[in-house]
Amino acid sequence: HAKAQGRNSMRMFDESMTRDSAERLRMENDLHEALERNEMRVFYQPQFEVATGRLVGAEALLRWCRPVQGMVSPADFIPLAEDTGLIVAIGAWVLREACEQASEWETRTGVPLRVAVNLSPRQLEAGHLVDHISHALQASGLAPSRLELEITESAIVRDTLSTAEVLSRLRALGISIAIDDFGVGYSSMSYLRELPVDKFKIDRVFLSAVPSSASDARLAAALIAMAHTLQVGLVAEGVETSEQLDFLRAHGCHEAQGYYLGRPMTAQDFEALIHAQVPGGPAAG
Ligand code: C2E
Ligand code: MG
Ligand code: MG
Ligand code: MG
């Protein structure tokens, strides 16, 4: 009896594995076509200067709208896009799209804002990244100083020397570089300090229990102090409450983003947000 059960559960295991790999294969096939089928969208989450409350920029966040399944989170398809190498083409599209959008906002609102684009380690390794980015800037007319690139610690750990070289060339163009999800990776302080980097983005795990947990609050305060010491910029991500924002202000954190301040939104909604900030704009009336 036990043997029969064992065989049964083995077969169920096989079937679910087959289903998972079939689903993965279907997703992979669809992902190949997603750009041509115009299923990718870029959403924009506002970033604010903490001390003044001024809108300073947007982070571009990719969304995949599948016809049947609906909106797929990047957490669910970026790993697949990275495994298959599709992230290189998709990432190039996000860059062009975000640069064009930021340039268009500036033309239409007169407000100069920065746009931050997430880069996959695969894009750094693929070569020609600097050429692609210069081309996206030229084609859109966006000033290099308006573009920020977000790179995770793990991307940097993969290959410090050539990564540092690419980052230096990008910075020479006037683009700024931010380390995303700062603090959750394994990078050593000694070489993070050596890297050509303008800004750290502290991961939202550090804020989630602030200010209720005293030890988490001390850790977050230490990260902010460290950015001050290293003289790099700092963005806190995942701000969900007014208490968290007060905490960041009290400790001198430069910038913040999070659901409390604004969710990722369509380009059109973001433009309305810019207008609402302009003195004399629709919201000021
Ligand atoms: P990330 O770069 O760390 O982006 C921040 C994520 O946190 C976003 O998730 C954002 O929607 C979410 N978030 C923002 N504020 C809050 C908050 O207050 N609370 C909570 N709980 N979450 C918040 P999203 O859009 O699902 O993106 C997930 C990740 O996918 C991103 O993490 C980034 O690593 C990756 N990703 C997104 N777009 C791209 C892209 O164009 N290229 C690449 N290579 N990766 C991307
Ligand atoms: Mg990011
Ligand atoms: Mg992040
Ligand atoms: Mg994160």
Image (spheres, rainbow, N blue to C red):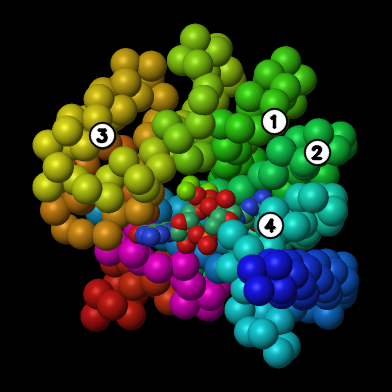
Distance of mark 4 from mark 1, alpha carbons? 23 Å
Q: Assess mark 4: CB under 8 A from ligand 1? A: yes
- Is residue 269 a member of the stretch shown in magenta? yes
What residue is disc 4 on? Answer: 78
Q: Which residue is mark 3?
A: 220
Residue at the spot of label 2: 129
Q: CA distance from mark 1 to mark 2?
A: 9 Å
> Is residue 176 toward the left or the right of residue 12 in the image?
left
Q: Earlier in the sequence, mark 4 or mark 1?
A: 4
Distance CA(mark 4)–CA(mark 3): 28 Å
**Left or right of residue 242, residue 149 in this image:** right
Residue type of the residue flagged with mark 2: Leu
The magenta-colored residue range is: 258-270
Residue drawn where x is 86% and y is 34% of the image: 127
Q: Earlier in the sequence, mark 3 or mark 1?
A: 1
Residue 85 counted in the magenta span: no
Q: Seen from this angle, which residue lies furthest front?
A: 1
Nearer-N-terminus badge (4/3): 4
Q: Which mark is drawn over residue 170?
A: 1
